[in-house]
Image (cartoon, rainbow, N blue to C red):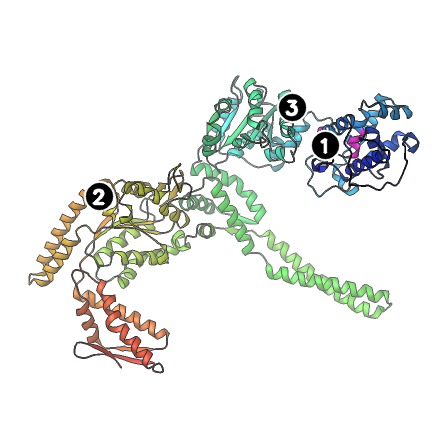
Amino acid sequence: MFQSKIFEKMTAYAKNSLLQANELARNESEKKISPTHLLRAIYLEKGSLGSNTLKDLGFDKEHFSSKKKNGNLKLNKETYLPFSPSLSRTVTQAYAIANSFNYPYVGTEHLVYALTESTDKSVREIFQKISFDEKKIKPFARAPLGNDFLSDLPKSVPLPDISFSKTKKNDSSQTPYLNQFCVNLNKEVEERNEIISGRDDEIERIIHILGRKTKNNPLLIGDPGIGKTALVSGLAKKINSGKIPGYLLNKTIYSLDMALLVAGTTFRGEFENRLKEVISEATRNKKVILFIDELHGIVGAGNSQGSLDAANILKPALSKGDIQCIGATTYAEHKKYIEKDPALARRFQPIQLFEPSKEVAKLILKNLSPQFEKFHNVAISEDALDASIELSVRYIADRFLPDKAIDVLDETASALKNKNAFNSDINLLKKYEDEFKEIVRKKELLVQQHKYEFALELQKKESALSEKISQITKKQSLTSIKKTALTKNDVALTISKITGIPIEKISAQKNNSKIADIEKRLNEKIIGQKNAIKIISDVFFRSYSGISNPDRPAGSFLFLGPTGVGKTLTSKIIAQEIFSSENAMIRIDMSEFSEKHTLSRLVGAPAGYIGFGEGGSLTEKVRHKPYSLILFDEIEKAHPDILNILLQILEDGILTDAEGRSVNFKNTIIILTSNIGTAEFTGAAKLGFQSSEKTEQLHQQFESIKNNILKEIYQRIKPEIINRLDHIIVFDALSEETIEKIVDIEMKKLSARLKKNSILLKIHPQILRFITKKSYSTEYGARSVRKNIQDLVETKIAQAILKNQQKKNFTLHLKNNDLFVE
């Protein structure tokens, strides 16, 4: 009978009383526990509120008669008797009483109050012995329940370690449930004294809907972080100011806390009862407007045990117009939950909220900045406000204004405050304070031992330390008065930490020098492609100086030309020079996307297909590394429909994945490569270097082939894609002179690797020419250079090192068209 659920919400005294009642019934050889057993058990539970109440009513041991009287009962937990029907009703009534007074646990005081209402004949006879007067005894028994002692209850009653819910502070309140389970926004706005601005038109629309005769429940729908909750706070502030139509004067907006409403509802019907009481109070008090943030949360809330959910409980009150309610949700949640319940959706009038403009966002930030300045002890400049908005819009694409700009400004101010904290003074102050306490302790000990002379010496040290502590404290106070200036460079540093984008890219001043000599640095690493590098550098000059369109990628190119001329190498070096890492290059082999359905690998599988929710290989990489170079290799091998994703990327710098999320490509560099025309380029190169024609004629011939290849490109790739690119760059074929420079670079790299192992390698110039002749190929470009160096040089050096491990100096010689090491 004594199941765990009975004790779940009982105080320790109440549990002991029931166990003691069980023992009393067993000692009297009863088959069931009656209310009289419980009444006596409560009386015997010394220290409990129920026992104290009974004693205050005039009860003593003489009022209880039993077959076996024993004041010190030993509880036997082996045998439990069932409750009598009247006792079951009494315990149920006690739970109801505790709930009505908003107590989280049932105590002996609730059981006593329930016993006073019991119809059990034996109980009523006992109450008659003390001259029972129903009109007097009930208020007397009820008195402990009306006292606001709940906060002190854990000190006097051994309850489990729980967090007490809000209690009804004032019995005379007309809205106890609203006070308990809701937050009074009017009061909160007044206490916080925040300036809410920039949404006057939207607030006006809410006021118009609240004034309607029917369907006067506004539903705010918008992306997260655009200020839906702040909008309702703005309405509450406007109501407080009195600058509102008459029908909204003296209205109070209560924000319903769904988590608190559901918390602790173990038994079936508890949640429904709480919500119905909230609705009932809102219905009786026509000055109440309910606000339900995250409205989609009411769908399914509280129905884990098969009971009605919050949405179905709210519908009748909304349909009758008994209550006024403001809801707020996002587009995704509205579509997922609210639209699927038309009966709920039709009770509300939707208001679509959009991300505020940069001007409105700046106004919001300007009104909030005094609070940040006071909290962080900084002075926020106008440039910092502009930078918070501009940089957050450009580099944090997956969030919305004003939320992201506010976060950036707040974090920047916090970082600046921590940077300027006087840590050395704090450590010194801590040291002095510890010494001061130790001296005081020793001084008091010496005084107790009557060693006054030694105590006087410590007194002098104590005074000196006190003076030092006073000076440091004064210095800190003066420092705190002076506010540190928060600049746009501080904001740029915060954006860099949030996004992982190098500060050089974000801060134009620091980035100028790096971009200014990009052409020179690229020419040092990419040999024989000066025309291509010139075109690429010009695009970067425009992009990183802020002249070109910021809503497009930083650069977009199509690389054409013979194989082995450095198209892929150029991409790697650009990633290294612009993004400071070769790992910033995302390579997509388009030959893997020759079928239409493979698009899902790039942007994610659609709903209903395997892999939905896992994201695409392209979109997920760019989401996590928005500062990247994306190389679409061999673009002509991809299915034509797959290339359509490039339209959105190249035009707007945005790509929407399968889950509807917008991925920002505005900070990327897009490079397409194609093998179209490779055979023609190779043939021209062979013909040119075997011919004795003049260089100018060869150049004209190469240009003619280039024009033919470009015509073919327009036939194979959609013109709308080609026209969105910054440039189509045709790489020149490599001459023998260029190959020799590449060989020289590769041999220097080999010497540098050997030098790390303390090995010196000498190379004669004729060896470079020998490897160049071996490596030069109009068909493969520079691809054979690395292979020939491995076969002709590295292998022989490795053999020589292994044979002569003590030797550290080696020379590479050429003899009879063969290389050897000595």
Asked if the stretch drawn in magenta spans residue 670, the answer is no
Q: Are marks 1 and 3 in contact (CB under 8 Å)?
A: no
> Alpha-carbon neighbours of circle 2 within 10 Å: few (<14), some, or many (≥20)?
some
For label 1, the residue is 169
Circle on res. 208: none
Residue kind at label 2, given as amino acid type: Ile
Circle on res. 281: 3
> Alpha-carbon neighbours of circle 3 within 10 Å: few (<14), some, or many (≥20)?
some
Q: Residue at x 82, y 41 (%)?
A: 75
Q: Which quarter of the picture shows residue 102?
A: top right
Residue 680 in the figure: left or right of residue 526: left
Asked if the stretch drawn in magenta spans residue 103, the answer is yes
> Which contiguous range is marked in magenta?
99-112
User: Which residue is farthest left?
Assistant: 692
Sequence order check, earlier mark of 3 and 2: 3
Query: x, y (%) of residue 258?
Result: 59, 33
Quadrant containing the N terminus is top right
The residues tagged by marks 1 and 3 sit, at their Cα atoms, a distance apart of 16 Å
Q: Is residue 550 visible?
A: no
Sequence order check, earlier mark of 2 and 1: 1
> Alpha-carbon neighbours of circle 1 within 10 Å: few (<14), some, or many (≥20)?
few
Q: Is residue 283 visible?
A: yes
For label 2, the residue is 717
Residue kind at label 1, given as amino acid type: Lys
